[in-house]
Amino acid sequence: MKALKVKVRYLALISLSFFAFIIIMPVTGYAKTLSAKAETALGDNYYNGTGGTKQDYAKAVYWYKKAAARGYALAEADLGYAYEHGFGITQNYSMAAYWFKKGASQGNPQAENNLGNLYYKGYGVAQDYVAAAGLFQKAAAQDDATAEDWMGYIYKYGKGVPQDYAKAVYWFKKAAAHGIASSQYDLGNAYEYGEGVPQDYSTADYWYGKAANQGYAMAENSLGFAYDNGRGLQKNSETAVYWYKKSAAQGNKAAEYNLGHAYEYGEGVPQDYSLAVYWFKKSADQGDDFAENNLGLAYYYGHGVPKDYSLAVYWLKKAAAQGSATSKRNLSIIEKQH
């Protein structure tokens, strides 16, 4: 009976918590690794506000530091991320790079991807597209979805690697299959313009729809444009406006312009020059040359705003300065008529 009591007590100690297990076990490398893993998990709980903890970035960093000090790669990556974004600690790109390098040296894909991001942007390290590409490649080889998205991007634009649309599509497809909205959008873009794949509007719209349903603003605008113009989908002005509004609500300047255009001509919404001007102004303030042109014309003709020749010229000149041939022509016409 006495032996039985000891055994029951021992099991009870184990059941108290994972940490009790670490205390009971001999201090071996195995136990040390588990302890670091548990510390990182606790840090994750504080970071996300899960596991019965209240979200607290500072406490998350505390636990990441403890685990990182033990050389645990995932904690090193998490600590680097905290430094990169200033979560629970003063933002410091150099320290972010330091910890990402430590995690990357152990082959952690999260650290490799995030270090690649720093090299790409030149944050905390000298900008180096080739180094960034190499790190993205390593992380992507481990099926890291964000790195796959980056691989598609650098091949699309030839950053650190020779430009190759087919390879860009290859990586966008892999990331898109993981649900990465930006890759779904870029894949739609590839099909829309026939870059790396045969042009196919229906397939483009399929991928725009996938990304738009995740709230990706550029995809929402592109899907709206497809409905607006009957490109790959049956034309539907009301549905186009629906997607333009969702995108414009996120500040997408192209969608703001397209929504203004819908109100100007009464397509999918009742015609309303005042609302057209409202959306043109929001887009023009972000430098959209189409919106600048239309806003200039609104002031010239007094559509939705009082006529104002000076403001008409001002906005048309801004669009013309961006190379808009239409605005240059309009500016020439109204200057001759004035």
Image (spheres, rainbow, N blue to C red):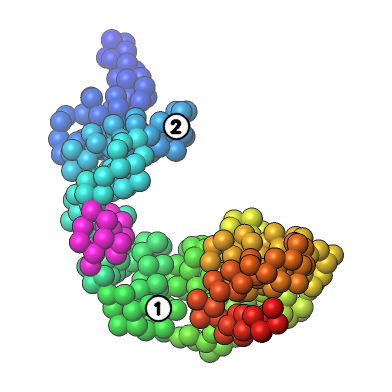
The residue identified by callout 2 is 55
Which image quadrant is residue 215 in? bottom right
Q: Identify the element where label 1 is drawn.
A: helix
Nearer-the-camera pick, 151 or 235 = 235
Using the image, determine if residue 197 lies above or below residue 264: below
Magenta region: which residues? 111-128
Nearer-the-camera pick, 207 or 156 = 156
Does 186 sit left or right of 12 as displayed? right
Q: Position of residue 9 (x, y in %)?
A: 32, 16
Q: Position of residue 52 (x, y in %)?
A: 47, 28
Q: Which mark is residue 156?
A: 1
Other-residue count near label 1 (Cα within 10 Å), few / some / many at <14 / 14–19 / ≥20 = many
Nearer-the-camera pick, 268 or 151 = 268
Q: Would residue 255 be visible to someone looking at this image? A: no
| Residue 117 is a magenta residue | yes
- Quarter of the image with the C terminus is bottom right
Q: Identify the element where label 2 is drawn.
A: loop
